[in-house]
Image (cartoon, rainbow, N blue to C red):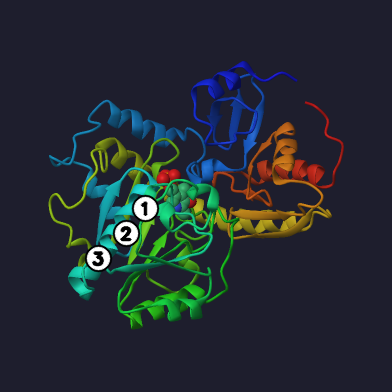
Amino acid sequence: MSEHPIITSIHSVSASNYSALPIVLSKGKGAWVWDDQGNKYLDFMSAYSAVSHGHCHPRIVQALTKQANKLCVPSRAFHSDNLHIFLGELCTLANLDKAIPMNTGAEAVETAIKAARKWGYEVKGIPENQAEIIVAANNFHGRTSTIISFSTDEVSKKNFGPFMPGFKIIPFGDAKALADAITPNTCAVLFEPIQGEAGIIIPPNGWLTEVSSICKSNNVLFILDEIQSGLGRTGKLFAYMHEDVQPDGLILGKSLGGGVFPVSVFISRNEVMDLFTPGSHGSTFGGNSLAAAVGLEALAVLKGEHLVERSADLGDYLIEKLKNIQSSLIKEVRGRGLWIGIDIDTNQTSGRALCLKLLELGVLTKETHNKTIRIAPPLVITPEEIDWALEKIAIVMQNGKIRKR
Ligand SMILES: *Cc1c(COP(=O)(O)O)cnc(C)c1O
């Protein structure tokens, strides 16, 4: 089959930093997307959680267009009339004091790193330029040169050095390794509560509680990156709520933008946030009026449509049904809420091969590290839509004949 002319064109003008599946999308609605030929697909990836609210959610699109006709980008050089409402809502939900609005996830992670270091020097009294942040192996926190400095993924680092010092890497989910790694110069830990890009890796029960108490007794900030896990993805508002802990800092992004717009924040306590002074940090677009309106509506829809509860209930249902599929290709199914990883037997097939077969049957998803198929549908998905997809997944996993549509 010859390549789609649009795909050929994309390859000729776009850097090849993604290996996209061979499909050209042109429309989305709820849990569904359409290609430019009019074929319909169920989105089982939700743009890595950015589209948790579903595609083109009418209320969010309406909030967007309404604000777009009023005021979009005033800049933080002036005050605007809706940022306080948006950030206030976030602080209440996270049980924290103040937020810094940014745009993309990586920027919010950078903000957290800067805040943690500043707190380390100005509050904890760490000697200048000695602050250390402890992170986990196989982490994913974004793509800036500082953030890739503490990645353990060779592809994302190769020939992008020199790298930023000041990070210590320990195994994910290992409380003892954390206790051992802390020094008087440790200002913070920075973890994903469940590792997303690594393959939906769930840490041992009680780990977050141990991390929290180790941080407390060593005067270290407990910071969580919930850019992908937050806002209902795991069946709780935030993934840390599966345990009885309260982080000192929380990073959000992706679904905070309601599937239409990049919106991110770093939220923390006054003790940390009050160290920022005019000029010490900023972003031209961060906290713009359009972003505040969209973010606020995204939070309202989350609540109004009970998306967190839906994620918990439908997630339990989907995980159980996936576990019931009899297939030698499946090694493990694990997940929390509507966030599921299916580990496959790479001796028999590849993640990409299975994703290509699923695509032919109308289910869109993407493998991670070739051995895990990621299942993360929009939280607005219905049980009937889940059943529809389960049928296709069962066909693919049971090596059934794939009929062309
Ligand atoms: C996607 C992601 C990021 C980076 O967000 P961008 O918006 O792509 O910069 C950071 N951390 C986690 C956990 C993510 O999943």
71 left or right of 53 in image: left
Which residue carries the number 3 mark? 129
Amino acid at the residue labelled 3:
Asn
Label whose residue precedes the other's in the sequence (2 or 3): 2
Which residue carries the number 1 mark? 146
Report the quarter where the N terminus lies.
top right
Which of 397 and 316 lies nearest the eye of the viewer?
Answer: 397
Q: Helix, strand or loop at disc 2? A: helix
Q: Residue at x 75, y 37 (%)?
A: 357
How much space separates mark 1 and mark 3, taking CA atoms? 15 Å
Labels 1 & 2 near each other (Cβ < 8 A): yes
Q: Residue at x 22, y 30 (%)?
A: 71
Labels 2 & 3 near each other (Cβ < 8 A): no
Q: Helix, strand or loop at disc 3? A: loop
Report the quarter where the C terminus lies.
top right
Which residue carries the number 2 mark? 113
Which of 138 and 203 lies nearest the eye of the viewer?
Answer: 138
Label whose residue precedes the other's in the sequence (1 or 2): 2
